[in-house]
Amino acid sequence: MKLDTNDLKDLAVGAAFLGTGGGGDPYVGRLMVQQCLDEGLEVELIDPSEVPDEALVIPTAMMGAPTVLVEKLPSGDEAVASLKRLESHLGQRAFATMPIEIGGINSTIPLVVGARLGLPIVDADGMGRAFPELQMETFGVYGVPGSPMVVSDEDGDQALILAKDNKDMEWLSRGVAIRMGGCAYIAEYSMTGADVKRTAIPNTLTLAMRIGRTLREAKKRHLNPFEALLELLPQTLYHHGRIIFSGKIADMQRETRNGFSMGRARIDGLGEHAGVMEIEIQNENLIARVDGVVKAIVPDLICVMDSETAEPITTENLRYGQRVTVMAVAVPEIMRTPEALAIFGPSCFGLDHPFTPIETMPR
Amino acid sequence: MRIGIDVGGTNTDAALMDGMRVVASCKSPTTGDVSSGIVAALKKVLGDSQVEPAQIEAVMIGTTHFTNAVVERRRLLEVAAVRLGLPATRALPPMTDWPDDLADTLGRHRYMVRGGHEFDGREISPLDEAEILRIAGEMKAKGLKSAAITSVFSPVMPGMEERAAEILRNEIPDIALSLSHEIGRVGFLERENASIMNACLAELSKRVIASFRQALRDMNITAPFYISQNDGTLMTPDHVERYPVLTFASGPTNSMRGAALLAGEPDAMVVDIGGTTSDVGMLMQGFPRESAVAVDIGGVRTNFRMPDVLATGLGGGSLVRDDGARIGPDSVGYEITEKALVFGGDTLTTTDIVVAAGLEDIGDRSRVARIPAATIETALTTMHRMIDEAVDRMKTSAEPLPVILVGGGSILISRDLPSASKVIRPENAAVANAIGAAIAQVGGEVDRIFSLEGTSREVVLEGAKREASANAVAAGAAEGTVNIMDIEEVPLAYLPGSATRIRVKAVGDLVIG
């Protein structure tokens, strides 16, 4: 499947939604892919089933604070350089690249790499949303090592990281990314086609496009975009969604700590939603409470959207006074197993509340 | 008493207000020199009401002059867009995602230079001063008079923009400079876009402000005058001269607030039809619904806080082509009184169509008597369809809402609109903009670096809010009306002691009398 300009626009909206507040505004990434299309390059998606079992797939991504990315734009060659360096380290050429993270700008970085190098992009990813740390991958959960990994910046600096486990890979590369200016571009989790089929969350790129298209078409036809989305979800691996709150942003706290955007949003309820919602943020929305009662918790998605237009709003774009609606969505079962929750469940973010699937959460 | 003036592309409107009451109002054509049109409007309202110039306590001017210049790609300077940030940022050069015709008008003079800062205050690269000198030479050779300078992370580290500006000014003493840290916030492309647009307006802003001054001097009005900006608050003329881009979208805010006051409908769609464009927005509780996402102006993405408004190219001066099937987006603008058929010109405009249809009696009717009936009908249908589509796009549900028609071009709409529950044409609708300008609010701001060491964020924020409110009151806001409109925090990780830049804006109604 070859992507065109409209696909990219839908993808950007869907990726912002799946980013659950984080992952960075995909706008910059979309422009970079558009630039490739304008130059006559092609962006070709392939289904995981089309990847031969023994073929090499090298995922590519950006890592760092999204608040840095919207200010310090990339040179455009960083992620390509990381993939090329990892190929030479492995002594093998990649058959395809793939996203590690469908949420936010990382849905688009592999498209730039694929277009520049003439490689297809596998329609799958390893997070099924956005997460703040690199070990939080279904790839790693089900046994694919993250390193060897290459980190590159815009200035030609590169680091090759050989870590004993994925958590150490995250820790070491994060330090490198901060030294590189808070934002760097990586190639990691190189794997075979067989591993892709076993460990990746399938068809998330096309899912993001479907979400974007659903919102766009609902608005065009004056249907309620929230309802249209809630109707789409049961047809996907993200099988349950619900609106958990609606109100006005009363306070936004944020700081950049250890290379992450940390924060807390307070929303005063409006209409049928009484009380005050608090959302805790580490790059992404982690937990949403109303008057202290948990309404949704990581890894399920907590998406803040404009109440009028249903446009997903990323954390860095949340502002005092905005009218917002908060939707929670179930993630695929591959992300909810005990092994998966041990890597990206609530306790991994210092939350003492157990994971409760959104579909069993009291309303 | 105060006077609100709206200087549009086609008409200059004035409203003399006593509190919330309209004492006198008028509409007069905008003139090429701007000031004689303002003088004519002022003479009329003061004459009609028998009010002496000395009784005027304040004059508020709203103008779409700068927005129109960008939308129409007219009267714009060519700009040197200087970016400091290489080797970062190269993926997306200046004016990426701009409409081609606007980038062409500004000359596509794009310069990417080594420089810029990291988030923690380190340099990405030292500023390439030799390259800035070379650019100065090229600017001189090309005759460029205005530059926009945007450096990575300049809202926290403005030094490199200032240094680059100094070098350019040494080489080209009369250069106009737009430094991005004075215009926008973190968010590189949007801030750069706004700075480039500001730069292309540098000459026009000086001319326009000078003519405002001249007009008031000619009328012996000595009261202070203000200009409204995009968030509906007022700015001093000196400020506007340097930052004309901040007036963008002030027109819609003014017309929507004026329309809410006139129609007494706090929840409605407002269609403001001017001479060149129609602006469609939504009123919620008497205030324009603000855009949550980036706003496009003339097709360019910015991150100003603005009402969510859709501008469509239909106005009273729009050109009618293809037997009425194609209208606008170009307009004869303020030259309508020379160029439109009914005024003796040779250009078929939308105003000629409504006169030919017998809906209005403007100018010389005999001059449009020979327009074929089919053309008249097609053009009327096209105009109604354009407005109905714009209203429909801006509505957030299928539920019909009242539509308030304002602006001089509201004569174009004579029929029902399928998207509206009812169409309201309030009295004084033609001057809603000027009324909105007259009731514009004043703001008070706090913008500086606070240390959170030994205190809590809540305490610091409360203090900043109180200070901003006090500043608004000091600037003339009535105490009970002050609200906090915007809070923004930029943590400065490179400074020790949890330093944060906090910006708080408070607004309130201007006390009169």
Image: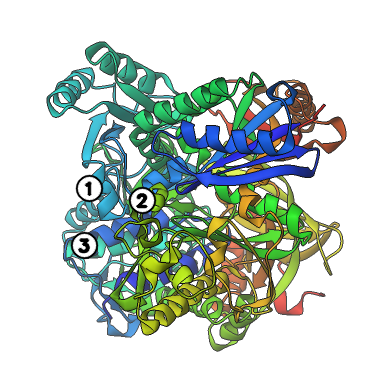
Residue depth check, mark 3 versus mark 2: number of the one nearer the observer: 2
For residue B504, above or below residue B373: above
- Assess whether mark 2 and mark 3 are in contact (beta carbons under 8 angstroms): no
- A13 with respect to A196 (left or right): right
Q: Hey, which quadrant is residue A166 in on the image?
A: bottom left
- A117 with respect to B40 (left or right): left
Which residue is identified by label 3? A38
Which residue is identified by label 2? B338
Q: Hey, which quadrant is residue B50 in on the image?
A: top right
Q: Are marks 1 and 2 on the same chain?
A: yes
**The disc labelled 3 sits on which kind of residue?**
Asp
Q: Position of residue B216 (x, y in %)?
A: 57, 24
Q: What is the residue that sits farthest to the bottom in this orientation?
A: A235
Which residue is identified by label 1? B104
Q: Quadrant location of the N terminus of chain B? A: top right
Q: Are marks 3 and 2 on the same chain?
A: no
- A337 with respect to B506 (left or right): left
Q: Secondary structure at mark 3?
A: helix
**The disc labelled 1 sits on which kind of residue?**
Asp
**The disc labelled 2 sits on which kind of residue?**
Glu
Q: Position of residue A141 (x, y in %)?
A: 50, 67
Q: Are marks 3 and 1 on the same chain?
A: no
Residue depth check, mark 3 versus mark 1: number of the one nearer the observer: 1
